Image (cartoon, grey):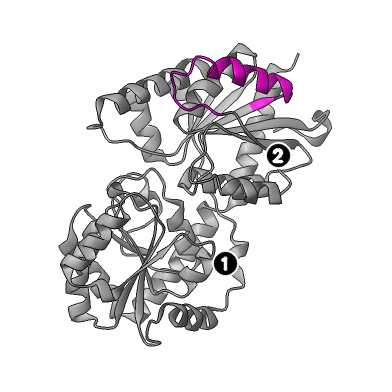
Amino acid sequence: MVSNDQVKRKYNIIFLIDGLGMGGAERLMMPILRNLNRDYFEPRVCALQIKDGNPIADDLRALGIPVDLILVPYLRDVTALPRLYRYLKDVRADLVHTQLEIADILGNIAAKLLRLPSVATIHTMPSQDMKLKSRLHQDVELFALRYFSNVVVSVSEEARKYYLDISRIPAGKLLTIYNGIDLSHFENLDYQQERFKIRQEFGIPNDAKILVTVAVLREFKGIQFMIRALPSIVSEVPNAYYLLVGNGSHRDSLEQEADQAGVRDHIIFAGQRDDIPQLLAASDLFVLPTLTEALPTVLAEAMAARLPIVASAVGGVPEMVIDGENGLLLPPSDSEALATACISLMVDAERRKVMGEQGWQVVTEKFNIHAQVDKLKELYLNLIKQYEK
């Protein structure tokens, strides 16, 4: 452990990321940067692309964190690496922390050329049946992580094992640090008030039961299987409504699914929202029918809102949801199992309450942001110390 008297000055930590849209990796930077110890570090964020207008940039600036843009339109841009090299030199970087594909590749190479320590966080578990171009990009990314980064952080043990199998990254440089959330956003919620307010906003009856999913609307999130399960759910629980929070490329397809299933009146496409704790507090059950996931932080948020969970047993999900305790785990792509699990919890208020309390215990013990930033602090300081002359 590095003590206060060993820190001679504040160190410049550059968070390098592909874009600042509303994806999981992007949103996860917010609680980290909000809670990173400023006695030790001066964080700075650099995006390499503009995604949906980079909305998170404004949130970061509101925290007093500088946000820069080094446009890299595509990976084969031959000017990108020299420009990034100059940028890291100009901002006097002491350590580079990369997230997502292009940043992982170019950021770790640039850091190595500058003799700077670098850390990369891997957030996903990509499919093995991806297209050729995506596979080539993944191979280049894994090559960069293997030979140019100092430490690769996995967000779950399952993801760590996965990358050990496919990447040839040495086991000693691949470690697990669970994503954390800021529990303070959930500690003072007025659940009754939020339930009334959200139902009023969306025109949902006051006695309705709300199932909720918060996700970027992409095909691999598996939401189509939940929509196919909804007719069976509504037949058993007529006052059930499905609140779908988020936007994405798959939204039109999901709306068509809802029309075909005949349950459009029971689905609310809420779009992108910035009041996730309030929406969760107003709900009765969280559903994550995902097909692949490293560690879905939204499950930690659901547990913080004391919601029971129905989720696919994929990736790092079983490290968060203990089947039968704080939720129910199911095989992916199984609408019938989704319907059965959701119905069993929707009709049992006492079981939902017990599971919600169990979830609160899990999230406070394993997924608290303060534990995550403490581990990152020690990692950063130890790496910087190794590189200091």
| Kind of element beneath mark 2 | loop
Quarter of the image for residue 141 reads: top left
Residue 235 at x, y percent in the picture? 17, 79
Q: Nearer the viewer, mark 1 or mark 2?
A: 2
Q: Is residue 349 left or right of residue 82?
A: left
Locate residue 105, reporting x and y percent.
48, 22
Question: Is 318 left, or right, of 367 in this rendering?
Answer: left
Residue 106 rendering spot, x and y as whole percentages: 52, 21
Task: Indicate yes or no whether the magenta region holds residue 80.
Answer: yes
Label 2 environment density (alpha carbons within 10 Å; few <14, some 14–19, many ≥20): some
Task: Write the residue at 32% across / 21% down.
Answer: 136
Question: In what quadrant of the picture does the N terminus appear?
Answer: top right
**54 and 36: which is toward the camera:** 54
What is the magenta range? Answer: 71-95
Q: How many marks?
A: 2
- Amino acid tagged 2: Pro
Give the quadrant of residue 88. top right
| Left or right of residue 228: residue 251 | right
Q: Which mark is residue 66?
A: 2
> SS of the residue at dot 1?
helix
Crowding around mark 1 (Cα neighbors within 10 Å: few <14, some 14 to 19, many 20+) is: some
The alpha-carbon separation of the residues under discs 1 and 2 comes to 28 Å
Kindly identify which numbered label has been placed on residue 144: none
* Residue identified by numbered label 1: 186
Residue found at x 48% / y 18%:
77
Q: Is residue 324 visible?
A: yes
